């Protein structure tokens, strides 16, 4: 479990935390857990998500197990800079859906003394690094990779396997479109898909 760092007497220090993993691994649940702890600590918290993500709720960030927290949907990463104001902690869900500006936005927020907590898929449905996530992982002080359970083997899963034949990069979906898979099951599924 991630325990918030204490940097002692130094001036207000910001940093970036990234929570990544495959679908159904608990990324958003962990993001919400950390943000709730900040709220309990009486820190001012602002939370953002991409406006395109309306799967569970138009505004709130909602995990697969229906834990939720209020948020502000934004179209562009730079909108976060305008809306974060004088908060202490910034939460960002589904970071993979933003463009690469999200990396600079997170750096600016952290450089201004804010704690920035970002959650997102580290790989797309083909098992390739997803959008700005590799760059966010590179600049983060703290990285937590969470895992799901493979729907095929019951082993640890780190891949999001798309069940449909749709090959567009971004396809919002849930259990009817995706399942978590371990490496072996993911590779077998991708090999079968190529044979079709």
Image (cartoon, rainbow, N blue to C red):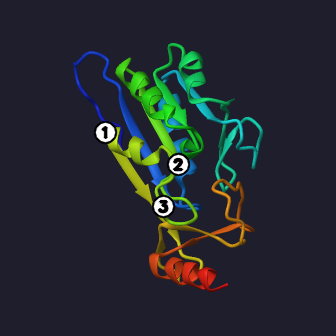
Q: In this view, does 107 lie above or below 2?
A: above
Residue 72 placement, left or right of 91: right
For the residues marked 3 and 2, what is the alpha-carbon distance in whole angstroms? 14 Å
The answer to whether residue 166 is above or below residue 191 is above
The picture places residue 62, in percent across and down from the top left corner, at 67, 46
Residue 85 lies left or right of residue 10; in this view the side is right
- The vertical placement of 150 against 57, above or below, is below
Dot 3: element: loop
Q: Disc 1 versus disc 3: distance between alpha carbons?
A: 23 Å
Tag 1's secondary structure?
loop
Mark 1: few/some/many CA within 10 Å (<14, 14-19, 20+): few
Q: Mark 1 = which residue?
A: 141
Kindly give the residue lying farthest to the front in the view shown. 195
Which residue is drawn at the image coordinates 53% and 52% (left, top)?
Answer: 27
The label on residue 120 is 2
The residue sitting at 53% across, 61% down in the picture is: 22
Image x and y of residue 15, in percent: 35, 30
Q: Is mark 2 on a helix, strand or loop?
A: strand
Circles 3 and 2: CB atoms closer than 8 Å: no
Compared with 119, 25 (above or below) is below
Residue 14 position in % (x across, y down)? 35, 25
Which comes sooner in the sequence, label 1 or label 3? 3
**N-term-proximal mark, 2 vs 1:** 2
Label 1 with label 3: CB-CB less than 8 Å: no
Q: Residue at x 66, y 56 (%)?
A: 64
C-alpha distance separating marks 2 and 1: 16 Å
Most extreme residue toward the left, as rendered? Answer: 9
Question: To which residue does mark 3 refer?
Answer: 128
Of pointers 3 and 2, the one earlier in the residue sequence: 2
To which quarter of the image does residue 125 belong? bottom right
In contact (CB < 8 Å): disc 2 and disc 1? no
């Amino acid at each position: 479990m991630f325990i918030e760092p204490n940097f002692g007497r130094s001036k207000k220090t910001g940093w970036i935390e990234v929570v990544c993993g495959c679908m159904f691994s608990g990324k958003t649940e962990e993001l919400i857990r950390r943000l709730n702890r900040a709220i309990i600590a009486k820190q001012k918290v602002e939370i953002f998500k991409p406006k395109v993500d309306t799967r569970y709720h138009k505004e709130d960030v909602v995990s697969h197990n229906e834990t939720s927290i209020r948020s502000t949907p934004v179209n562009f990463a730079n909108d976060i800079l305008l809306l974060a104001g004088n908060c202490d902690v910034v939460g960002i869900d589904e970071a993979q859906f933003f463009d690469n500006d999200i990396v600079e936005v997170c750096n600016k927020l952290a450089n201004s003394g804010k704690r920035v907590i970002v959650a997102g898929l580290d790989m797309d449905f083909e098992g390739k690094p997803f959008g700005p996530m590799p760059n966010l992982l590179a600049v983060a002080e703290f990285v937590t990779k969470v895992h799901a359970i493979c729907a095929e083997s019951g082993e640890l899963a780190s891949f999001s396997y798309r069940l449909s034949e749709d090959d567009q990069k971004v396809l919002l979906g849930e259990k009817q479109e995706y399942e978590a898979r371990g490496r072996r099951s993911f590779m077998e599924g991708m090999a079968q898909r190529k044979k079709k």
